Image (cartoon, helix red, strand yellow):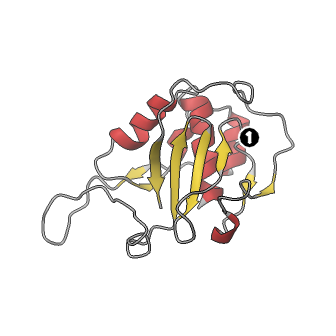
């Protein structure tokens, strides 16, 4: 859900990966065989303690991959591919695509594309989890924008370190 994934992904980009979209893409996509079952607080490495506490309530949990799955027929697990016809079958509700300008959030049961959340967005921003709110024809739906000091990041509009557009996670 966006309210869980976006804060972790925004903070990871801004701090753990030092605004390097290629390093983030490698970690989230290339370095796992199948995919992710849960994004954890390890994505908040190098983020300031007050931000980590604001996002987690002081709790810690590890990221978990699906790389150790055993399939019913014993064949090796394969990376899930979500298409219009299979998203509902596979239980996928959300898609997150890493773009040079930010994270595209796709409500897979409603649309094929979605709004882009700028990389400079404060990770403490609270996002709406209602799938219909994530229309490609509107801005990313926030419930409450953060009014505290912005996180350490390059100014809005500053280029990312890479221009790769890659799907990040699907849930």
Instruction: Identify the residue at horizontal 63%, vertical 69% (top origin).
Output: 131
Please say whether residue 46 is visible from this viewpoint: no
Looking at the image, which is closer to me, 70 or 53?
70
How many numbered callouts?
1
Given the current orientation, which residue lies at the most extreme left position? Answer: 74
Instruction: Identify the residue at horizontal 56%, vertical 57% (top origin).
Output: 113
* Image x and y of residue 1, in percent: 58, 62
Which residue matches tag 1? 122
Instruction: Identify the residue at horizontal 73%, vertical 37% (top origin).
Output: 50
* Image x and y of residue 77, in percent: 22, 59
Given the current orientation, which residue lies at the most extreme front position? Answer: 137
Looking at the image, which is closer to me, 33 or 87?
87
Q: Residues within 10 Å of mark 1 (few under 14, many from 20)?
A: many
Q: Which secondary structure, mark 1?
A: loop
Q: Is residue 90 above or below residue 150?
A: below
Please say whether residue 166 is visible from this viewpoint: yes
Q: Quadrant of residue 139?
A: bottom right
Instruction: Identify the residue at horizontal 46%, vertical 30% (top origin).
Output: 22
Describe residue 9's horizontal placement relative to residue 132 as left or right: left
Describe residue 85's horizontal placement relative to residue 153 as left or right: left
Given the current orientation, which residue lies at the most extreme bottom position? Answer: 89
Q: Quadrant of residue 129?
A: bottom right
Looking at the image, which is closer to me, 56 or 30?
30
* Image x and y of residue 135, in percent: 67, 63
Q: Is residue 106 above or below residue 97?
A: below
Given the current orientation, which residue lies at the most extreme right position? Answer: 147
């Amino acid at each position: 859900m966006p309210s869980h994934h976006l804060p972790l992904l925004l903070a990871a980009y801004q701090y753990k990966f030092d605004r390097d979209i290629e390093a983030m893409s490698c970690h989230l996509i290339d370095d796992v065989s199948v995919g992710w079952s849960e994004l954890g607080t390890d994505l908040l490495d190098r983020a300031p303690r007050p931000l980590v506490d604001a996002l987690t309530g002081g709790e810690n949990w590890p990221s978990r991959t699906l790389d150790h799955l055993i399939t019913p027929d014993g064949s090796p697990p394969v990376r899930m591919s979500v298409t219009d016809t299979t998203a509902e079958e596979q239980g996928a509700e959300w898609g997150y695509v890493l773009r040079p300008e930010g994270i595209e959030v796709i409500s897979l049961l409603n649309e094929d594309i979605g709004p882009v959340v700028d990389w400079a967005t404060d990770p403490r921003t609270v996002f709406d989890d209602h799938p219909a709110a994530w229309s490609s024809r509107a801005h990313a739906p926030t419930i409450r924008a953060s009014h505290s000091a912005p996180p350490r990041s390059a100014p809005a509009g500053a280029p990312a370190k890479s221009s790769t557009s890659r799907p990040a996670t699907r849930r």
